[in-house]
Image: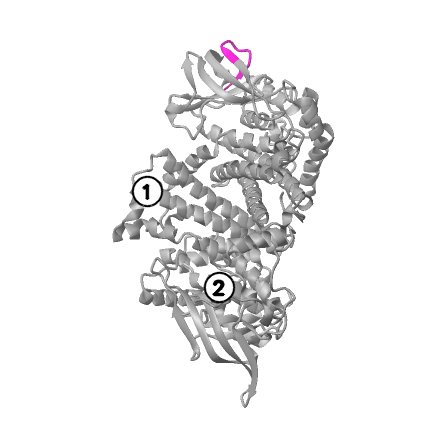
Amino acid sequence: MSDLAISEDLRDISVEDFRLRARAWIKANLGPIQPWDISQDCENDEEELVAVARDRALQRKLFDGGFAGICFPREYGGQGLSPAHQRAFNEELVGHEFPSRFAVPTFSPCAAVLLEFGTAEQKAAHIPAILKGDEVWVQMLSEPGGGSDVAGATTAAVRGQDADGDHWILNGSKVWTSRAWWADWGLCLARTNWNVPKHQGLTVFLLPLQQPGVEIHRIERLNGESEACQEFMTDVRIPESDRMGEIDAGWTVGTRWMYHERMGSNSPYVTRPIGISNAAAEGPTPVAIARRVGRLDDPAAQELIGEARELDIVTHALRSRLADAAASGKGNTDSSAIDRLFCGIARVRQSTIAFELAGSSAAGWTEEEEEETGAQGMEFLMRQVSCIGGGTTEIARNVISERVLGMPREASGDRNVAFRDVPRGPARG
Amino acid sequence: MWHSLTSDQDLFRDTTARFLDSHVPLARLRKDYRDHPAGFDPAYWTSGAELGWTMCLVDEADGGGSVSGRGAVDLALIAYEFGRHAAPGPLVDCNVVAAALSGQAGDLQQSVLGELIAGSAIASSALGAAPWQRPGEASVTIRRDGDDVIIDGAVRPVESGKQAGHLLVTGRSEGGMTQALVPVDAGGITIRALKGMDVTRRFASVTFDNVRAPASALVGEFGRADDHVSRQIQNAAVILSAEAVGAMDAAFAMTLDWAFHRYTFGRALASYQALKHRFADMKSWLEASHAISDAAAEAVADQTSLAAETASSAKAYIGEYGPELAQDCVQLHGGIGVTYEHDLHFFLRRVTLNRLLYGTPADHRRLLAAIQIGQEHAA
């Protein structure tokens, strides 16, 4: 609203007019959605890098077309429009390719946090670069010593001064960072004060990933895929200008960061198709699996197919409801934990449904079958990822019960205790 | 329930809420209605009809109308209050039949519709064929005999079958489904009251033994009622889902309150993580149920391309999680949760019953699958 640079024609464009413009542009400029737009899993690193380059180009295409950063202020290269405009664009995007590797975590939470807490210089340096597809960001939160307890970070930054000015020296390790091996920048939560309780001694930094002193290891998952990484930081020098927010006030940033993380692809800052599409283009459908094993006429299989569809439709309805509540200001910001919990459980169920439909065919499969209808056995082994990644469903249950329903908080051993005195287990890799 | 209601809609909902508060409080239902043969008083129903309970889905030309112009959305507000109050009365069937008769020109259809809108008579739907069935599974057949039709078969459960003046019977015919409106005293119809689980809602079994009805009793065309029936199922799904959500809200609020005030081992129940997590699960089911119930009402009101799928999703999801939530509420209450004296059972009954009417979750999932399979076949 304070952005006086918005040109009249765009500032006043109605959602419906914007939708029509978006529809025409998308049809003219974007091809059909690709399987790797949804799963983001590539056969190997070479393919992954090709997909990354394509996503950067797609993001640039959105930028050149005037559709990048629809809710970002125009002074940082965005369109200065409302969440309703972004939503209209996202609805029109259904069935089309899009720069999926930018959605999460680059736009939400990283760009959203930058916009909220970055200095004018930081925003000017990074938001246009993100909108143009030049910078992919990751979030450096979890540590080997603790997954969900992100405020218990022990990666440490120590303040220093030398001929080049004020700076920080970072040491420690972050883990479960998706695709850090080719990403550009990280938002890093670090300990800057050990003599105060844990939430009061954290600071957030902006960190270029591909630099000496940041060693990036790949973590191989049980299905052979290795998108997640662990970073080891050794005496990494961070200029004072790359500190975000106040010193030791990193949890002020952190709580909003968590909020934007839970919003995830539901965030108004994210460009990705929303709506209930015919899922055929988005990977193997329950119908395709049932057809492969000849069970389309089996009433039990039909019930499973219908239940999977039901969960898609309910998910969409729930997300719309929570987004409407957030937009109207009536929603509790912690309600995003409801979305997180629901979706985790729903995806687990859908994975189980696919596995059940496949029957014994999930035990062994040909390459052609995997290409056509996926590998339900292996996907079942990875089923719980949807309840772990991005904050476990157990943490979501704590958030819902304590902050949405107002129930008493769990007892903890780290409240009102200097962080250096908090009991800790040994770090494990 | 909705985040944005117009002031007219809010007044409409609130008027019914206050009416139910004063006329059918739970204490009164518990004491006076358990053995009431109909489960409701005719005067109560007529007063409700005056508040607009039976006109929302009827065209203005036929004497109907709704405050927002989106009848299914407005009716869902009433149904929600019915659920929150575990209110008596054949809300679902009277509305489903009224909507089916709206736009039908026949004298019989118009006169029954007028009675339904006024609340002076009850009509029930006898669903002897349904879209989730294969043709051979229909329990009622309707065939032509000269200018008449002959109805054979049996249907259960039929809500308020003993109280109804007319039945909208659905049966399988050659080429598709047929619907006819028949008086309950037509020769060959036997209606038998059934025992049931709700404190106030009554059900019957209806048999049709060579029942003859004139062609003028048909609702829609012979053998071509499939689309009408689907639309009626959508309407029923909206009403039953919204009502179940109202009952879920009431049960959940009651149980949340209990968790804060019930102490055990020197701590409130609400302080135990094992229980907190169950409340979180219930809250996610409840929010999802609100969301899909609202989405179904809107999709059905606007007849979007996803209306049938959204309505079936609501019926299936809420059909599954309504009873799950209510049973969890019972568990968290402990023994008192299964006593007649406690209020909780009113809501457990309501969500459990609603799961079973107009298609179970399994039925609606097969419907959803049929739509999916059809679409992927066409693609």
Q: From the viewer's perspective, is A409 left or right of B154?
A: right
Query: Residue B363's spot in the image, x, y percent?
Result: 44, 32
Where is B363 relative to A416, above or below? above
> What mark, if any, has residue A359 been given in the picture?
1
Are callouts 2 and 1 both on one chain? yes
Residue segment shown in magenta: B180-190
Q: Is residue B46 visible?
A: no
Circle 2 or circle 1, nearest the eye: 1
- Residue on which the image places disc 2: A105
Q: Is residue A195 visible?
A: yes
Q: How is the image coloured?
A: one colour
- Please tell me which residue lies in front, A86 or A229: A229
Query: Residue A148's spot in the image, x, y percent?
Result: 52, 61
**Quarter of the image with the N terminus of chain A in it:** bottom right
**Magenta stretch: includes residue B312:** no
The number of numbered badges drawn on the structure is 2
**Magenta stretch: includes residue B186:** yes
Q: Provide the secondary structure element on which disc 2 rests.
A: helix
